[in-house]
Image: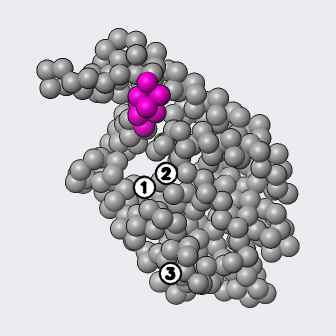
Amino acid sequence: MYELIQAGERTYYIDCPVKMGIFLLDKTHACLIDGGSGKDAAKKALKHLSAQGWELACVINTHSHGDHTGGNQLLQSRTGCKIFANGIEQAFTQAPILEPAFLFGGFPPKALRNHFLEAAPSNALPLTDPAFPQALEVINLPGHCFDMIGLRTPDDVVFLADALASEETMQKYQLSFLYDVEAYLATLQKIEGMQAKLFIPSHAAATSEIASLARLNREKTLQIANTLLALCGAPRTFEELLQAVFAHYALHMDWNQFVLIGSTVRSYLAYLYNRQEVTARITDNQMIWERA
């Protein structure tokens, strides 16, 4: 765990539950791709850099979720490194309270003010800043969240962030967080057609062949959409639908799962509504969802 693996002449990654990439800007300065899930992950990353004689110049966050930005603050306070984030992800990285507020749909209660949903804030710059490493190719990968990106290094290694889940993860958790279903399906189609020496998803094994995993993720996403469609066979309120989803996938509800799965179910409903596959009407001051 937390083993440093070389993926190219100037490209490395730290093999851990949320993989962290390393790209050498020159012989002594390194760029970290994602800041780790928390202080411990950040400390391990700094230990690897120090052992190799590298200084941390910057961190590029693929997106703003806490398991990718949780180590930012420690990295920045210890090294003075710059942190970069894309679009809306920059705002969430600078003001992490936006995450639980967005998921809850209002001021978040204390139960949601945890490090998993609300990382420590860090001072993030946009990708358009002149200091952003120009050797890295930015790949837009929306869907999992607002403005997620991947990165291709000059070694032809592609970091895919959370665009793909492993087959084991899909089987274990069934339903993963998703913001925009239509954008996510388009991202999966893009990834399926990609070629690279090596692909490194954050939550799946590194591989030189990515198309099959992209197809599995697409099939799973469409399967979930069809499950929601079937559950709308009878008129249901959102709360009834959410309860049915938890029962169908044998999930256990807690505060985090309530907002993460709840937000994801709403995203699937929006996708189906926009495709005119479900209808929504207000009856007796209740929003009722039903198959079209």
Residue 24's quadrant in the figure? bottom right
- The disc labelled 2 sits on which kind of residue? Cys
Q: Residue 165 placed where, x, y %?
A: 63, 42
Q: Residues within 10 Å of mark 1 (few under 14, many from 20)?
A: some
Disc 3: CA contacts within 10 A as few (<14), some (14-19) or many (>=20): some
Q: Secondary structure at mark 3?
A: helix
The C terminus sits in image quarter: top left
Tell me the kind of residue under disc 1.
Phe
The quarter of the image holding the N terminus is bottom right
| Residue 271 x/y as whole percent | 46, 33
Q: Amino acid at mark 3?
A: Gln
State how far apart marks 1 and 3 are (Cα). Answer: 19 Å
Magenta range is 267-276
Q: Nearer the viewer, mark 3 or mark 2?
A: 2
Measured in 3D between alpha carbons, the distance from the residue under mark 3 to the one under mark 2, in whole angstroms, is 24 Å
Is tag 1's residue or tag 3's residue first in the polypeptide sequence?
3
Residue that label 2 marks:
145
- Which labelled disc corresponds to residue 76? 3
Q: Position of residue 47 (x, y in %)?
A: 65, 77
Residue at 47%, 54% in the rendered image: 146
252 in magenta: no
Say which residue appears at 55% left-offset and 76% top-offset.
128
